[in-house]
Image: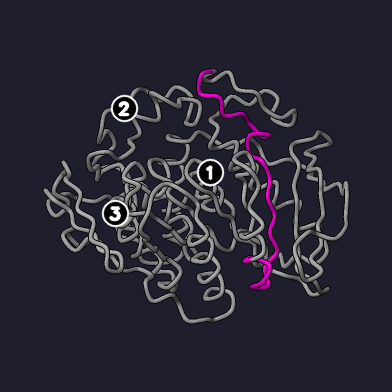
């Protein structure tokens, strides 16, 4: 089968070897384990707990325990290098009296509380001045930490990863640990003056996108979640696997420390008929979700991300927030580009400020893919 993608004036053709989605029975997030349809909010709360048990515990493993106390310890405060009198706060996040990781917060000038965009990808280099300036210029603060301070990411070490002292004894997967790090960063931000705690967004790229998506799905304090090119165990489908797409089997083989301990080696489509990543997306509803994808990033499975986007939509519709499930495609490869950041800012403006959504939002570049 040949899938044709269109971004602007550029046509992308990809030869694929996929299962025919039109003949597949996609797992229904709106159907209880009993077989009955979700018809009320109480039904959805029950279904939500079922999904968490079915997908989250089995695939990622349980997150580390929520601590009794999280403390944000200020280490330095002063002007940031960005123009416009922005301020920089450097912090240490302590969990039950034990250091977990460092956190940096940059705020635009002014005393009024501002919405925050939180990113955990400091391990790949902290955000560029261009990115930070774009965020500040739109009235947002930017917080960033290094998730590998929470748990390391050394593939050659398998499950023998280093981790922060606060996770002593934890035996779970790295994606779960990193998601826990996002949640503890939210704890810390809630203690900082000048933060609008009702408008905290989390964003991550690639494996960081997997962690951000899991954190947002499980923490209702997070108002907006964005996953960029997140692939398998992120926004990418397990059931729709074009040639060149990352699979769960790839993760178990190459990065076993990311997922739940004891997860057996998986064959492509191992979970067919029981679950897929739209279940994780559904846990975010009715809060806001943005998936950003690059057409040439075949490893991240942009086709599968579109299909999980569509398969999660009935939950957002049912909960009265159809516009809170968004996906945007761009031309290019595997990167967290400035275009992706601007897409996130435009979506946040729409969610928090009522701005008009971007014209390319929720537009499929794959006309040959069947509808769900």
Residue 266's disc number = 2
Q: Quadrant of residue 192?
A: bottom right
Of the residues under marks 3 and 1, which one precedes in the sequence? 3
Q: Could you tell me which residue is drawn at 43 percent across and 58 percent down?
A: 291
Q: Report the side of 284 relative to 303 (left or right).
A: right
Q: Locate residue 65, reporting x and y percent.
A: 65, 37
Q: State which tag comes first along the sequence, 3 or 2.
A: 3
Q: Is residue 110 above or below residue 237?
A: below
Region of the chain picked out in magenta, as a range: 134-156
Q: Depth check: 122 or 38 in front?
A: 122
Q: Residue at x 31, y 27 (%)?
A: 266
Q: How dense is the environment of label 1, judged by Cα within 10 Å: few (below 14), some, or many (20 and up)?
A: many
Give yes or no for residue 148 being in the magenta stretch. Answer: yes
Q: Is residue 298 magenta?
A: no
Across and down, in percent, residue 148 comes to: 63, 34
Q: Which mark is residue 208?
A: 1
């Amino acid at each position: 089968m040949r899938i044709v993608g269109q971004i602007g004036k550029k046509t992308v053709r990809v030869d694929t070897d996929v299962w025919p989605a039109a003949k597949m029975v996609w797992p229904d997030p709106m159907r209880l384990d009993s077989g009955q349809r979700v018809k009320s909010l109480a039904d959805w709360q029950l279904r939500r707990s079922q999904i968490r048990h079915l997908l989250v515990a089995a695939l990622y493993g349980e997150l580390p325990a929520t601590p009794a106390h999280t403390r944000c310890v200020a280490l330095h405060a002063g002007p940031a290098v960005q123009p416009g009198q922005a301020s920089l706060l450097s912090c240490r996040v302590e969990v039950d009296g034990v250091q977990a990781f460092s956190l940096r917060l940059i705020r635009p000038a002014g005393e009024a509380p501002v919405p925050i965009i939180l990113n955990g990808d400091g391990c790949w280099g902290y955000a560029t001045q261009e990115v930070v300036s774009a965020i500040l210029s739109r009235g947002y603060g930017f917080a960033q930490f290094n998730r590998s301070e929470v748990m390391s990411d050394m593939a050659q070490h398998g499950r023998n990863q280093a981790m922060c002292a606060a996770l002593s004894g934890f035996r779970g997967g790295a994606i779960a640990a990193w998601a826990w790090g996002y949640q503890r960063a939210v704890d810390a931000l809630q203690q900082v003056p000048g933060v609008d705690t009702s408008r905290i967004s989390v964003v991550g790229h690639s494996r960081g996108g997997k962690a951000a998506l899991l954190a947002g799905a499980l923490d209702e304090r997070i108002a907006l979640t964005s996953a960029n090119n997140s692939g398998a165990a992120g926004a990418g489908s397990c059931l729709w696997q074009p040639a060149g797409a990352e699979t769960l089997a790839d993760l178990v083989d190459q990065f076993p420390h990311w997922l739940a301990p004891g997860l057996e080696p998986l064959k492509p489509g191992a979970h067919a008929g029981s679950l897929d990543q739209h279940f994780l997306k559904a846990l975010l509803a009715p809060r806001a979700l943005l998936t950003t994808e690059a057409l040439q990033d075949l490893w991240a499975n942009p086709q599968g991300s579109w299909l999980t986007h569509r398969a999660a939509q009935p939950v957002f519709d049912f909960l009265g927030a159809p516009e809170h499930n968004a996906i945007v495609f761009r031309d290019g490869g595997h990167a967290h580009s400035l275009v992706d950041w601007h897409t996130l800012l435009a979506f946040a403006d729409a969610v928090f400020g009522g701005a008009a959504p971007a014209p390319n939002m929720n537009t499929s570049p794959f006309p040959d893919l069947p509808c769900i």
